[in-house]
Amino acid sequence: MTEPVAKLIDVKKYYKLRGETVKALDGVTLTISPSSFMAVAGPSGSGKSTLLNLVGALDTPTSGEVIVNGENLAHLSGTEQAMMRRDHIGLIFQSYNLIPVLTSLENVEYVMLLQGVERAERKERSLALIKEVGLSGMEDRRPSELSGGQQQRVAIARALVSRPSLVLADEPTANVDSKTGGALLDTMAELNERHGTTFIFSTHEKMVMDRASRVVRLRDGRVEADEAG
Protein backbone atom coordinates (compact mmCIF):
# COMPACT_ATOMS: atom_id res chain seq x y z
CA MET A 1 0.00 0.00 0.00
CA THR A 2 1.35 3.45 -0.94
CA GLU A 3 2.24 5.70 1.98
CA PRO A 4 0.04 8.84 2.13
CA VAL A 5 1.79 12.15 1.42
CA ALA A 6 -0.02 13.66 4.39
CA LYS A 7 -2.43 12.55 7.08
CA LEU A 8 -4.44 14.50 9.65
CA ILE A 9 -5.85 12.58 12.61
CA ASP A 10 -8.54 14.30 14.72
CA VAL A 11 -6.77 17.65 14.30
CA LYS A 12 -8.00 20.61 16.33
CA LYS A 13 -6.70 24.15 16.24
CA TYR A 14 -8.19 26.62 18.70
CA TYR A 15 -7.32 30.30 19.11
CA LYS A 16 -8.16 32.81 21.79
CA LEU A 17 -9.60 35.99 20.30
CA ARG A 18 -10.79 38.76 22.60
CA GLY A 19 -11.44 36.25 25.35
CA GLU A 20 -13.41 33.92 23.06
CA THR A 21 -12.23 30.50 21.85
CA VAL A 22 -12.20 30.28 18.03
CA LYS A 23 -12.29 26.72 16.68
CA ALA A 24 -10.36 27.13 13.41
CA LEU A 25 -10.26 23.34 12.99
CA ASP A 26 -12.46 21.12 15.12
CA GLY A 27 -11.59 17.45 14.70
CA VAL A 28 -10.42 17.05 11.08
CA THR A 29 -9.29 13.63 9.85
CA LEU A 30 -7.99 13.33 6.26
CA THR A 31 -5.67 11.09 4.26
CA ILE A 32 -3.99 12.64 1.20
CA SER A 33 -2.65 10.26 -1.43
CA PRO A 34 0.41 10.81 -3.66
CA SER A 35 -0.25 12.66 -6.95
CA SER A 36 -3.50 14.18 -5.64
CA PHE A 37 -4.84 17.39 -7.20
CA MET A 38 -7.05 18.45 -4.34
CA ALA A 39 -9.04 21.52 -3.32
CA VAL A 40 -9.90 22.44 0.27
CA ALA A 41 -12.94 24.64 -0.15
CA GLY A 42 -15.21 26.67 2.06
CA PRO A 43 -16.22 30.20 3.04
CA SER A 44 -13.93 32.64 4.87
CA GLY A 45 -13.30 31.39 8.40
CA SER A 46 -13.97 27.74 7.53
CA GLY A 47 -10.40 26.67 8.38
CA LYS A 48 -8.87 26.31 4.88
CA SER A 49 -5.72 28.35 5.45
CA THR A 50 -5.27 26.90 8.94
CA LEU A 51 -5.30 23.38 7.46
CA LEU A 52 -2.67 24.32 4.87
CA ASN A 53 -0.50 26.00 7.52
CA LEU A 54 -0.58 22.86 9.68
CA VAL A 55 0.28 20.51 6.78
CA GLY A 56 3.02 22.95 5.72
CA ALA A 57 4.64 22.89 9.18
CA LEU A 58 3.98 26.63 9.51
CA ASP A 59 1.79 26.15 12.58
CA THR A 60 1.12 23.46 15.23
CA PRO A 61 -2.24 21.89 16.16
CA THR A 62 -3.86 22.30 19.57
CA SER A 63 -4.38 18.52 19.51
CA GLY A 64 -4.34 15.63 17.06
CA GLU A 65 -1.61 14.49 14.68
CA VAL A 66 -0.31 15.93 11.41
CA ILE A 67 1.89 13.44 9.53
CA VAL A 68 3.79 14.48 6.38
CA ASN A 69 5.99 12.04 4.45
CA GLY A 70 5.63 9.58 7.32
CA GLU A 71 6.88 12.09 9.92
CA ASN A 72 4.71 13.30 12.80
CA LEU A 73 5.41 17.04 12.64
CA ALA A 74 4.92 17.40 16.42
CA HIS A 75 7.96 15.15 16.95
CA LEU A 76 10.26 17.35 14.85
CA SER A 77 12.33 20.22 16.23
CA GLY A 78 11.95 23.72 14.76
CA THR A 79 15.06 23.12 12.64
CA GLU A 80 13.76 19.75 11.42
CA GLN A 81 10.41 21.33 10.51
CA ALA A 82 12.25 24.03 8.53
CA MET A 83 14.18 21.30 6.70
CA MET A 84 10.91 19.47 5.98
CA ARG A 85 9.52 22.65 4.39
CA ARG A 86 12.74 23.28 2.46
CA ASP A 87 13.13 19.76 1.06
CA HIS A 88 9.63 18.26 0.81
CA ILE A 89 6.98 21.00 0.75
CA GLY A 90 6.51 23.67 -1.93
CA LEU A 91 4.53 26.76 -0.87
CA ILE A 92 2.60 29.08 -3.22
CA PHE A 93 1.23 32.14 -1.44
CA GLN A 94 -1.63 34.43 -2.46
CA SER A 95 0.79 37.38 -2.32
CA TYR A 96 3.49 35.48 -4.32
CA ASN A 97 6.22 36.24 -1.68
CA LEU A 98 8.91 36.75 -4.32
CA ILE A 99 12.13 38.53 -3.32
CA PRO A 100 11.89 41.96 -5.03
CA VAL A 101 15.64 42.45 -5.66
CA LEU A 102 16.08 39.04 -7.33
CA THR A 103 15.34 38.15 -10.95
CA SER A 104 12.85 35.42 -11.89
CA LEU A 105 15.73 32.97 -12.31
CA GLU A 106 17.27 33.92 -8.94
CA ASN A 107 13.90 33.63 -7.17
CA VAL A 108 13.42 30.12 -8.55
CA GLU A 109 17.00 29.13 -7.69
CA TYR A 110 16.80 30.42 -4.12
CA VAL A 111 15.53 27.24 -2.39
CA MET A 112 18.22 25.15 -4.09
CA LEU A 113 20.82 27.64 -2.88
CA LEU A 114 19.64 26.88 0.68
CA GLN A 115 19.81 23.15 -0.12
CA GLY A 116 23.42 23.46 -1.27
CA VAL A 117 22.71 22.35 -4.85
CA GLU A 118 25.62 23.03 -7.23
CA ARG A 119 25.36 26.20 -9.31
CA ALA A 120 25.22 24.50 -12.72
CA GLU A 121 22.41 22.16 -11.61
CA ARG A 122 20.52 25.05 -9.98
CA LYS A 123 20.55 26.97 -13.22
CA GLU A 124 19.63 23.98 -15.38
CA ARG A 125 16.66 22.96 -13.20
CA SER A 126 15.45 26.56 -12.81
CA LEU A 127 15.58 27.30 -16.54
CA ALA A 128 13.72 24.06 -17.31
CA LEU A 129 10.88 24.93 -14.92
CA ILE A 130 10.70 28.56 -16.05
CA LYS A 131 10.16 27.16 -19.54
CA GLU A 132 7.54 24.67 -18.27
CA VAL A 133 5.49 27.46 -16.67
CA GLY A 134 5.65 29.53 -19.89
CA LEU A 135 8.09 32.28 -18.89
CA SER A 136 10.99 31.68 -21.30
CA GLY A 137 12.70 35.00 -22.05
CA MET A 138 11.71 36.53 -18.69
CA GLU A 139 14.49 34.98 -16.61
CA ASP A 140 16.19 38.34 -15.95
CA ARG A 141 13.06 40.30 -15.02
CA ARG A 142 12.46 41.30 -11.42
CA PRO A 143 8.98 40.88 -9.85
CA SER A 144 8.14 44.58 -10.43
CA GLU A 145 8.60 44.01 -14.18
CA LEU A 146 6.09 41.11 -14.27
CA SER A 147 2.30 40.98 -14.24
CA GLY A 148 0.47 39.29 -11.34
CA GLY A 149 -0.04 36.12 -13.38
CA GLN A 150 3.64 36.03 -14.36
CA GLN A 151 4.71 36.50 -10.74
CA GLN A 152 2.47 33.60 -9.75
CA ARG A 153 4.13 31.45 -12.45
CA VAL A 154 7.54 32.29 -10.95
CA ALA A 155 6.14 31.27 -7.54
CA ILE A 156 4.91 27.96 -9.02
CA ALA A 157 8.32 27.27 -10.58
CA ARG A 158 10.03 28.12 -7.26
CA ALA A 159 7.69 25.78 -5.36
CA LEU A 160 8.41 22.86 -7.72
CA VAL A 161 12.13 23.28 -8.38
CA SER A 162 13.22 21.57 -5.14
CA ARG A 163 11.22 18.50 -6.28
CA PRO A 164 8.87 18.40 -3.28
CA SER A 165 6.35 15.61 -2.78
CA LEU A 166 3.70 18.17 -1.81
CA VAL A 167 2.78 21.68 -3.01
CA LEU A 168 0.42 23.83 -0.94
CA ALA A 169 -1.26 26.74 -2.72
CA ASP A 170 -3.26 29.23 -0.64
CA GLU A 171 -5.94 30.86 -2.86
CA PRO A 172 -3.56 30.74 -5.87
CA THR A 173 -5.96 32.46 -8.28
CA ALA A 174 -7.29 35.15 -5.92
CA ASN A 175 -5.20 38.04 -7.28
CA VAL A 176 -5.49 37.35 -11.02
CA ASP A 177 -8.31 37.57 -13.55
CA SER A 178 -10.28 34.42 -14.41
CA LYS A 179 -8.50 33.81 -17.75
CA THR A 180 -5.05 34.03 -16.11
CA GLY A 181 -6.28 31.92 -13.18
CA GLY A 182 -7.53 29.22 -15.52
CA ALA A 183 -4.20 29.17 -17.37
CA LEU A 184 -2.29 28.90 -14.07
CA LEU A 185 -4.47 25.98 -12.96
CA ASP A 186 -3.94 24.24 -16.32
CA THR A 187 -0.17 24.68 -15.87
CA MET A 188 -0.31 23.18 -12.37
CA ALA A 189 -2.46 20.28 -13.60
CA GLU A 190 0.13 19.52 -16.31
CA LEU A 191 2.94 19.67 -13.73
CA ASN A 192 0.94 17.40 -11.40
CA GLU A 193 0.54 14.87 -14.21
CA ARG A 194 4.13 15.12 -15.45
CA HIS A 195 5.92 15.06 -12.10
CA GLY A 196 3.39 13.25 -9.88
CA THR A 197 3.57 16.08 -7.35
CA THR A 198 0.62 16.37 -4.97
CA PHE A 199 -1.15 19.75 -5.05
CA ILE A 200 -3.48 20.99 -2.29
CA PHE A 201 -5.29 24.27 -2.92
CA SER A 202 -7.27 26.31 -0.44
CA THR A 203 -10.00 28.07 -2.37
CA HIS A 204 -13.54 29.37 -2.53
CA GLU A 205 -13.47 29.63 -6.34
CA LYS A 206 -15.57 27.31 -8.49
CA MET A 207 -12.99 27.06 -11.31
CA VAL A 208 -10.42 25.62 -8.87
CA MET A 209 -12.94 23.10 -7.51
CA ASP A 210 -14.00 22.14 -11.05
CA ARG A 211 -10.43 21.21 -11.97
CA ALA A 212 -9.64 19.33 -8.74
CA SER A 213 -9.79 15.52 -8.63
CA ARG A 214 -10.95 15.75 -5.00
CA VAL A 215 -12.79 18.51 -3.13
CA VAL A 216 -12.83 18.60 0.68
CA ARG A 217 -15.40 21.13 1.89
CA LEU A 218 -14.92 22.71 5.30
CA ARG A 219 -17.45 24.60 7.37
CA ASP A 220 -16.80 25.95 10.88
CA GLY A 221 -13.58 23.94 11.13
CA ARG A 222 -15.15 20.58 10.25
CA VAL A 223 -15.24 18.46 7.09
CA GLU A 224 -18.69 18.98 5.63
CA ALA A 225 -18.12 16.88 2.49
CA ASP A 226 -15.30 14.94 0.79
CA GLU A 227 -16.05 14.50 -2.90
CA ALA A 228 -14.34 13.16 -6.01
CA GLY A 229 -13.94 15.94 -8.59
Image (cartoon, helix red, strand yellow):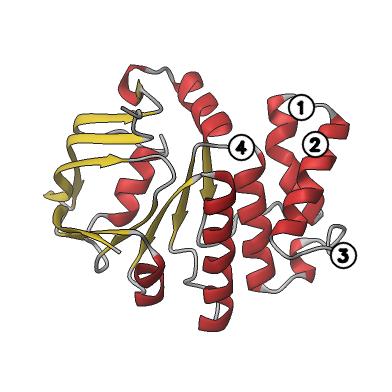
| Sequence-earlier tag: 3 or 1 | 1
Secondary structure found at label 3: loop
* Residue 122 tag number: 2
| Sequence-earlier tag: 2 or 1 | 1
> From the viewer's perspective, is residue 122 above or below residue 186?
above
- Residue 109 image position (x, y, % from top left): 75, 42
The residue singled out by tag 1 in the image is: 117
Residue type at tag 1: Val
Horizontally, residue 65 falls left or right of residue 200, namely left
Q: Are marks 2 and 1 in contact (CB under 8 Å)?
A: yes
**What residue appears at the point 24 percent right and 62 percent down from the top-left corner?**
45
**What residue appears at the point 59 percent right and 50 percent down from the top-left corner?**
194
The residue singled out by tag 3 in the image is: 137
Residue count near mark 4 (Cα–Cα under 10 Å), binned few <14, some 14–19, many ≥20? some
| Sequence-earlier tag: 2 or 4 | 2
Horizontally, residue 179 falls left or right of residue 220, namely right
Q: Are marks 3 and 1 in contact (CB under 8 Å)?
A: no
* Residue 163 tag number: 4
**What residue appears at the point 58 percent right and 45 percent down from the top-left corner?**
195
Residue type at tag 4: Arg
Residue count near mark 2 (Cα–Cα under 10 Å), binned few <14, some 14–19, many ≥20? many
| Sequence-earlier tag: 2 or 3 | 2
Secondary structure found at label 1: loop
| Quarter assignment of residue 7 | top left
CA gap between label 2 and label 4 equals 12 Å
CA gap between label 1 and label 4 equals 12 Å
